[in-house]
Image (cartoon, grey):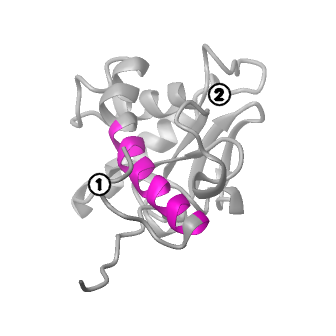
Amino acid sequence: MFPFRVPYPFVRPDQHSCSVVIKSTDGTFLRDFEDKDDLHIGVTSSKGVLYEYDQRGLTIGPANPSWDQSLVVFKETSQHRFLSWDDALKTVAEHSTWTPSRYCEINFNCYDFVVAFLQNLGGHCDDAISTKAKFIEQCVSPAIAKAFKYIKLYRHVWEDGFYLCGLDS
C-alpha cells in the first residue's frame, strides 16, 4: 500500500476572498468540535476582510486567530461578480440592524447577517437562502458533514497513530 494524503479542509478567511466561512464557536474544529456544537459564520470581501456579526455587533477587519480553522461554505469564483459582492456586503453592513443590542444567540445572530447578505447579493441558490433554516440545511450542513469525516480521521490518527478504513463506523 502506498501512503496517501487527505486534503486539509480548513482555511484562513483572509486567503479566501468573496467567501462565506464558518468556524467552531468555541475552540477549534480539530481539537474541540462535536457535531452538535455551535458554529459562527462570516463573509469575506474581495480583499479577504472578514465581516462577522455577534454579541459585539457587526465587526469588520482581519480575522483573529480563532478563524484559522474555518470552512468555506460558499465561494464566489467569477471575478466579474467581485464588485457586486463587495457592493452587497457594504449595503448590508451599513444597515442599522447589526447592533449589539439586537443580537440574540437564538433568534437574531450571525446566520441572519449572512443570509441577509446573500439575499441582497441575489443570483445564488435563491431557494437555499430563502430562510435561515434552509441555508443551514442546504449549505452549512453538507460542509460540516464533509469536515467531520476529516476530523474523525484526524482524531483516530492522533490518538492511535493510525486509522484502518472500514473498521470504524
**What residue is rendered at 42% in x and 68% in y?**
8
Indicate the quadrant containing the C terminus: top left, top right, bottom left or bottom right: top left
Q: Is residue 128 above or below residue 53?
A: above
Which type of secondary structure does the marked residue at label 2 adopt? loop
Work out whether 6 lies above or below 152. below
Most foreground residue, 3 or 113: 3
The residue at which mark 1 appears reads as 166
| Disc 1 secondary structure class | loop
Viewer-nearest of labels 2 and 1?
Answer: 1
Dot label at residue 98: 2
Magenta stretch: includes residue 41 = no
Residues in magenta, as a range: 142-159
Residue drawn at x 36%, y 64% as measured from the top left: 164
Tell me how far mark 2 sits from mark 1, CA to CA: 47 Å
Q: Residues within 10 Å of mark 1 (few under 14, many from 20)?
A: few
Residue 17 image offset from top left, x and y in percent: 43, 62
Badge 2 or badge 1: first in the primary sequence: 2
Q: Toward the viewer: 31 or 96? A: 31
Whether 162 is drawn above or below 19: the answer is below
| The furthest residue to the front | 167
Please name the residue shown 47% across and 71% down the image.
Answer: 162
* Amino acid at dot 1: Gly
Quarter of the image holding residue 1?
bottom left
Picture coordinates of residue 30 (x, y %)?
58, 57
Task: Decide whether residue 156 is among the magenta residues.
Answer: yes
Name the residue furthest top: 107
Q: Main secondary structure of the magenta part?
A: helix
Residue 129, disc: none
Q: What's under tag 2, amino acid-wise?
A: Trp
Is the residue marked by circle 2 packed among few (<14), some (14-19), or many (20+) residues within 10 Å? many
Question: At which x and y percent is residue 15?
Answer: 48, 69
